Image: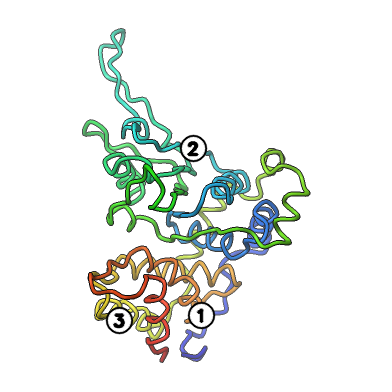
Amino acid sequence: MSDTNVPGNADRDLIDSELRDALARSIAQVNSILLGKRLEVRLAFVCLLAGGHLLIEDLPGVGKTTLAHALALTLGLDFQRVQFTSDLLPSDILGVSIYEREAGNFRFHPGPVFTQLLLADEINRATPKTQSALLEAMAEGQVTIDGRTHTLPEPFFVVATQNPLDFAGTYPLPDSQLDRFMLRMSLGYPDAESERSMLASMDRRRLLESLPACLRPTQILALRQATTGVLASSALVDYVQRLLEASRAHAEIRVGLSPRAGLAILAAARAQALLAGRSYVLPEDVQAVFPYIATHRLNLGASARSGRAAIVARLLEATAVR
């Protein structure tokens, strides 16, 4: 697939120079806090601009919470953190209606989900019932309590962290919950040079306290709107569809990628293109985001001899770009 498949007006500017500069400053600032993780920081911004939610699975202490804090401060978003535990209840997240005797009626008291960036810390330490409290919020930007629907602030962005499933006291996320996360990634240990710089510099918590906001919520909404305007040619959409079909026909995969996964791939690829300064999507954009969208959505069969990551890599290798 070449640039000849891109419509003729694809070189138009979707965002002005001021907004692009603010976006670049935002990415640089988060990189200054989370050292040596440029790819992961970029993926976080891809997820944000694409209107998705982010799941970070890794060991404790590698910077998952720090990334969420840095994003909230840099983006100028209202921020709430919920520490998920086995005794956490859905009402602890969503809120509760309390009867007020003086007024003679029930009054809804919003929970921490009514924010712009919600950190669901160690989400897999809570029971599936509590995990599912976020389903409506993540899918529709609203919650329904006692038959009344309450709209969440915009933008609404969930960053969830989870420990590896072999850790004690963890509950696997249901497939329906996993599907609500556009991207899943790991941070991993920093390289030696980045770790040395981190150890020799100021404590990350003190650095976070001094971070200025580089973007405003209205600018984030403008960036999301611009992302939807990034062009995906019919040939590019065909390529994404072939990837979906390949996942469904693979012998080791019991349940392949859904149409919703295809929409997520296109949305993330558009965001990837926008961050690259383009107003059109290339196959390389799809390939860059595909592993982080597909891996946690695949349901392998009992006869599978390979891990999800290896199967996803083979899907990319075997699917032709025409």
Is 210 on the left-hand or right-hand side of 322?
A: right
Give the distance between the C-alpha atoms of the residues marked 1 and 3, in whole angstroms. Answer: 18 Å
Taking the image as shown, residue 285 lies to the left or right of residue 147, namely right
- Name the residue: 50% across, 90% down: 2
- Give the residue pinned by disc 1: 284
Q: Circle 2: is it few (<14), some (14-19), or many (20+) Cα within 10 Å?
A: some
- Splitting the image into 4 quarters, where does residue 210 fall? top right
Q: Between tags 1 and 2, which lies in front?
A: 2
The tag earlier along the polypeptide, 3 or 2, is 2
Q: Residues within 10 Å of mark 3 (few under 14, many from 20)?
A: some
Mark 1 secondary-structure assignment: helix
Q: Amino acid at mark 1?
A: Glu
Mark 3 vs mark 2, CA separation in Å: 39 Å
| Depicted 230 relative to depicted 189: above or below | below
Q: Picture quarter containing residue 98?
A: top left
| Residue under label 3 | 246
Q: Residue at x 55, y 69 (%)?
A: 274
Q: Position of residue 106 (x, y in %)?
A: 27, 19
Task: Tell me which label, 1 or 3, sits earlier in the chain.
Answer: 3
Q: Amino acid at mark 3?
A: Ala
Discs 1, 2 touching: Cβ within 8 Å? no
Placement of 28 over or under 1, stated as above or below: above
**Does label 1 or label 2 sit earlier along the sequence?**
2
Label 2, secondary structure: give it.
Answer: strand
Kind of residue sitting beneath label 2: Arg
Q: Is residue 132 above or below residue 49?
A: above
> Which quarter of the figure has residue 321?
bottom left
Q: Which residue is mark 2?
A: 81
